[in-house]
Image (cartoon, rainbow, N blue to C red):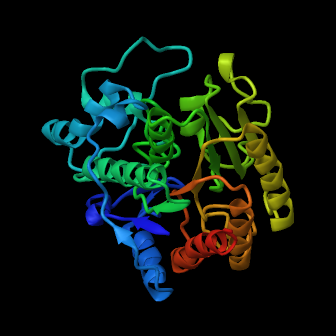
Amino acid sequence: MKIVHTEKHRLRASKTELSGGIFIEPHESAQRVEHIMAELSKRHHTDIVEPRDFGLEPILRVHDADYIAFLQTCWTDWQAEGFEGEAIASTWPSRRMTRDGPPRNIDGKIGYYCLASETSISGGTWEAAEAAAQVALTGARIIKDGARCAFSLCRPPGHHAAQDMFGGYCFLNNAAIAAQSFRDGGAKRVAVLDVDFHHGNGTQAIFYDRADVLFLSLHGDPDDAFPYFLGGADETGSGPGEGFNANYPLPPGCSYSTWVAALTEAMDRITDYAPDALVVSLGVDTFERDPISFFKLSTDNFTDYGRLLAGLGVPTLFVMEGGYAVAEIGINTVNVLEGFESALP
């Protein structure tokens, strides 16, 4: 399996995360990729390639142009305003007292584009996010060129980023950008399967009214887990997209048997849809010792569901999302990939 990776991920090096009312060292850090790369090396996965540069056009096929301009200049504008810390939103549009469009001042503008204030913006954030999108696009190109599978080791992750909103450590929706590139490259139907612990609210928002991209997400029940405001089983799409969005909210303490039953149901939906390509938003924060989740998957379970996914028989791009049990993130990630490869015909 080809692995796409860039050291530009290190440009995303924020020092602050707002959690539980205090500032902490961010859960989303460069160490995550270091552990994955170390495990890949340990198991002799050496087919690692640098991303190609596809420019901004495929990113703008998914994201709003004004939002992209905001990301490109946010840190500079924040510093120009004289703020001393990292850029963190402190105000948001109210449900009942909102006028259209973002404010001119960066302090208000960041709130307009932000969905969760745990995620700060600092120098290098845009550059790392844009590089991660190129990593996803390169993985998609590898699949389009005939490979059965590929792994885009994206950082920062992406599945919480909507057309014009960031948060949950995400700025550009790497999986959605890859899915759109498959469509633009001739695929009639694409499926996105999100196995991260947290609901892929950004991906859902991007494709919710479309029938050409089937989105399915297994995640912690939004009554109990971030990002809270999307992810219910009753959210099935709108307009032409009705029936093409499937959520599987699962309870605290969810066992692998319960989780894999939901996965099997999602896989049946994918089989019926018969996509030309599958994008897997691969978050391994379903692990039993992850610090910010409440599922109970063990290390061996990741190998098992990797095998199951191979049974779909669809060209598959794995796009890295979450996973914050840093000591085990490499083991669990590579287990999925090796499980998948071991079951290929």
Residue 289 in sight from this viewpoint: yes
- In which image quadrant can residue 332 be found? bottom right
Residue 288 in sight from this viewpoint: no
Residue occupying image coordinates x 69% and y 43%: 216
Residue 34 drawn at (x, y percent): 39, 75
Residue 80 drawn at (x, y percent): 13, 38
Residue 128 drawn at (x, y percent): 30, 54
Asked if 45 appears above or below 27 in the picture, the reply is below
Residue 118 relative to residue 210: left or right? left
Residue occupying image coordinates x 40% and y 44%: 171
Asked if 151 appears above or below 52 in the picture, the reply is below
Residue sticking out furthest to the bottom: 42
Which of these two is toward me, 181 or 296? 181
- In which image quadrant can residue 51 be found? bottom left
Residue occupying image coordinates x 73% and y 66%: 305
Residue 175 relative to residue 59: left or right? right
Residue 265 relative to residue 307: left or right? right
